[in-house]
């Protein structure tokens, strides 16, 4: 069974600090040109947004209902499914030779859009199965997401002032992301080992179902829309690989401390699943470059 004492106060403070650093690093990788590029080719970005905020929450809801997830497990999966894309999807796009500029543009736009869409999607999908004693703080979630734009803006400001400094900040942000993953592994793997090695566990099955289905449907929608192979890959990866640090930050900043450890279980498991599936997808895209 899951141990509700997964993270100590020090762990949570460290995760918050690493997440903040990661978001500044993410901002340092963005420029106003990324947003202008999105406006210049809105169709590709809109297809990505429709996939990300359309398919993923819907698939997560189907998984919750179909596999009988309840309480914090159900809400944790929905929280993860309703977030924007993040640096991990950009990394996979780079290694899979996808359209990296499109991936970055979708990440930049979806981060802004998530301020409104994440609370709305949580209200639509999660209100019916949230525990009565654990109400979803919709406005607090929106406020946290809005505040998370500040470190991104700070990173963009640094890039505008000095490209060299921005590159250093971006590297530090990437290191923070790697350290964040290590912290989550160290603090969580003993509790999550059964989930990671047992495909019969409904939580793991739910994460695999959502990640794989999201990538496939995102790719399919992009193909139907007439996007090229490199753009299809970017949309697929951006759809399936959600922003785990953002979901973690929302949980730590807005939910009662007594519920936080249990809520972190599914985002952690989803992130591990997306990492594995994204790696397989990257290898496949490199093997079949015309796909």
Image (cartoon, rainbow, N blue to C red):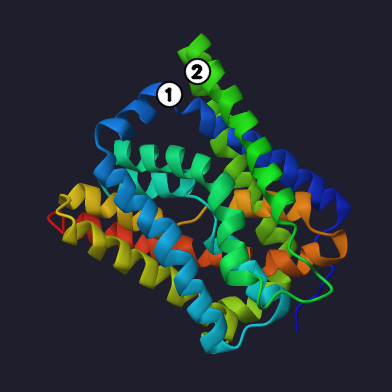
Q: Is residue 46 left or right of residue 261?
A: left
Q: Is residue 173 above or below residue 91?
A: above
Total marks placed: 2
* Quadrant that contains the N terminus: bottom right
The answer to whether marks 1 and 2 mark residues whose Cβ atoms lie closer than 8 Å is yes
Q: Position of residue 49 (x, y in %)?
A: 38, 51
Q: Marks 1 and 2, Cα distance to the nearest angstrom?
A: 7 Å
The residue beneath circle 2 is 159
Q: Is residue 58 above or below residue 173?
A: below
Q: Tell me the SS state at disc 1.
A: loop
- The residue positioned 78% from the left and 66% from the top of the image is 135
Residue 142 % position (x, y): 66, 47
Q: Secondary structure at mark 2?
A: helix
- Does residue 6 appear anywhere in the picture? no
Residue that badge 1 annotates: 31
Who's the residue at 53% across and 63% down the image?
81
Q: Residue 285: x, y in percent? A: 23, 57
Q: 227 left or right of 255?
A: left
Q: Nearer the viewer, residue 184 or 122?
A: 122
Q: Residue at x 24, y 65 (%)?
A: 220
């Amino acid at each position: 069974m899951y141990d509700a004492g997964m993270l100590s106060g020090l762990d949570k403070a460290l995760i918050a600090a690493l997440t903040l650093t990661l978001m500044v690093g993410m901002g340092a990788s963005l420029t106003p040109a990324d947003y202008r590029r999105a406006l210049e080719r809105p169709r590709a970005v809109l297809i990505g947004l429709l996939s990300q905020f359309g398919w993923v929450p819907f698939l997560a809801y189907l998984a919750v209902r179909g596999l009988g997830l309840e309480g914090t497990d159900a809400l944790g999966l929905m929280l993860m499914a309703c977030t924007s894309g993040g640096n991990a999807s950009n990394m996979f796009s780079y290694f899979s030779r996808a359209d990296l500029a499109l991936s970055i543009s979708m990440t930049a736009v979806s981060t802004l859009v998530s301020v409104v869409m994440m609370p709305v999607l949580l209200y639509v999908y999660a209100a019916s199965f949230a525990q009565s004693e654990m109400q979803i703080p919709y406005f607090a979630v929106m406020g946290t997401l809005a505040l998370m734009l500040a470190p991104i803006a700070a990173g963009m400001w640094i890039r505008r002032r000095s490209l060299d400094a921005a590159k250093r900040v971006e590297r530090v942000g990437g290191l923070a992301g790697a350290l964040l993953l290590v912290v989550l592994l160290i603090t969580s793997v003993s509790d999550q080992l059964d989930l990671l090695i047992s495909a019969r566990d409904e939580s793991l099955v739910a994460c695999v179902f959502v990640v794989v289905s999201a990538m496939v449907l995102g790719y399919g929608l992009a193909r139907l829309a007439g996007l090229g192979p490199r753009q299809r890959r970017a949309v697929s990866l951006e759809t399936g690989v959600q922003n785990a640090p953002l979901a973690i930050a929302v949980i730590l900043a807005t939910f009662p401390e007594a519920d936080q450890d249990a809520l972190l279980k599914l985002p952690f498991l989803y992130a591990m699943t997306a990492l594995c599936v994204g790696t397989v997808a990257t290898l496949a895209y490199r093997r079949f470059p015309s796909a």
